[in-house]
Image (cartoon, rainbow, N blue to C red):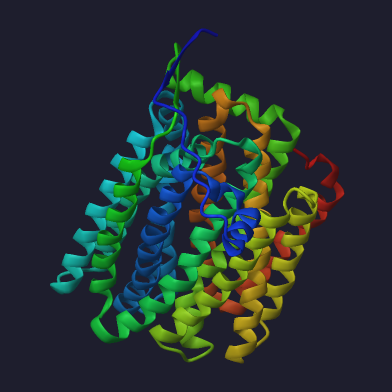
Amino acid sequence: MESDRFIVDESPEICVGEDVSWGNKILKAFPALRSRNYQLYFAGQLISLVGTWLQVVAEGWLVYILTNSAFFVGLDAAMAMLPTLLFSLFGGVIVDRYPKKKILLFTQSSAMILALILGLLTVLKIINVWEVITLSFILGIVNAVDSPARQAYVVELVEDKSTLSSAIALNSGMFNAARVIGPTIAGILIAVTGTGMAFILNGISYIAVIIALFFINTPTVIERHIIDPIKAIKEGVVYTVSHPTIRLLLTLSGVVSIFGWSYSTLMPVIATQIFHLGATGLGYLYAAGGFGALLGTFLISAFSHKVKPAIYIVGGNFLFIISLLLFTFTSHTLVAAILLFFAGLGLVSQFSMTNSTIQHTVENNMRGRVMSLYTLVFIGFGPFGNLEIGFMAQHFGTDFAIRLNVIIVLLFAVYLWLNRKRIHT
């Protein structure tokens, strides 16, 4: 296969702060932060992701208020993820062919405009559920390109590839720090101002990551393959399926995405029906899982080089299963929050290390396409889980729906444990 390889820009700067003990401890625990480029990206994305979680909570709450239906809550979440299923493989081809920084500037700007439109329609009280679902679907199209681009861009942000696990763990940390901060703010904001302001603030938050991208200076490696997109996709799929480690980890991601992660879709329903909480209480439940995920982020960033990946992935999987199963048997809010904390710890441990292991394993010229497949199974399979759990919850109750899904994840967890020797970097 012929290809033209282009290298542009200068190497990223390495920024090591003043020689103070607390600074050294932070850099030792999170070595990816030695890179100035990653520092900029981290700060911008953290602000933006807080806004994203404002919208996640507000949108689920808005749909439930508009329809009083668990099915429509699941349908909205499914439509947001469906474009990833349909288009993420083409997104991976785009990521492998064009500068990732330019792709991200376009996708982040597009997401900002969509959030502002949703906010204005809601504030003006002319919103209906089908408009929410339509905007979710359009945003999903943007994310089908944005997600693999962000996954693949991390490698360009760190000069020392030995810090890649730290960078990927910190990416999960950004997501989960936002998952703590965003829902808490969202709960208060919805109660005081309504859902519309949450959408508008999310739109404004994208400015932070757009500014950060303008100041980032990375070596841009562009692989312009002289093959058409369909052949490029086929090449990526064949590479992935033929690699035993990547194949196993992508299967894990797909199973947990469909039958594990989908529990979060029902949180607005669970908060109101089981725990009799309002929007603020819903935010606290989301935050509890986020705190657990933050702990998982720290453990992986600080100790990933000392602990085998299989321990994080298999152990995190079982921790998530046990915690979520116990969650369905309690009606006590504090106990539920503690169990969600451990569920979040288990989820982020397995997914962060799964991502890191794949990134360490994959060849550079296949990175965009393999990460688009990862996005496909991690996010794109989500609609199946959201629709399934929404339907089951509507007809058999939320507890039964979650327990059924947990049993399915448990069956795969046994298979994963039996094949744990395949998990290595």
Query: Residue 117, image x and y in percent?
Result: 19, 59
Looking at this view, name the residue that lies furthest to the front: 19
The quadrant of the rendering that contains the N terminus is: top right
Residue 27 sits above or below residue 392 on the image:
above
Foreground: 223 or 375? 223
Instruction: Tell me if 273 is positioned left or right of 425 in this view.
Output: left
Rendering coords of residue 366 (x, y %): 56, 26
Residue 325 place in picture, x, y as percent: 70, 75
Q: Nearer the viewer, residue 9 or 388?
A: 9
Which of these two is toward me, 413 or 51?
A: 51
Q: Residue 194 vs residue 69: left or right?
A: left
The residue furthest top is 2
Q: Quadrant of residue 127?
A: bottom left
Q: Residue at x 28, y 75 (%)?
A: 195
Camera sees residue 390: no
In the picture shown, does residue 213 fall above or below 410?
above
Residue 201 shows up from this direction: yes
Residue at 44 percent of width and 43 percent of height? 37
Most foreground residue, 226 or 164 = 164
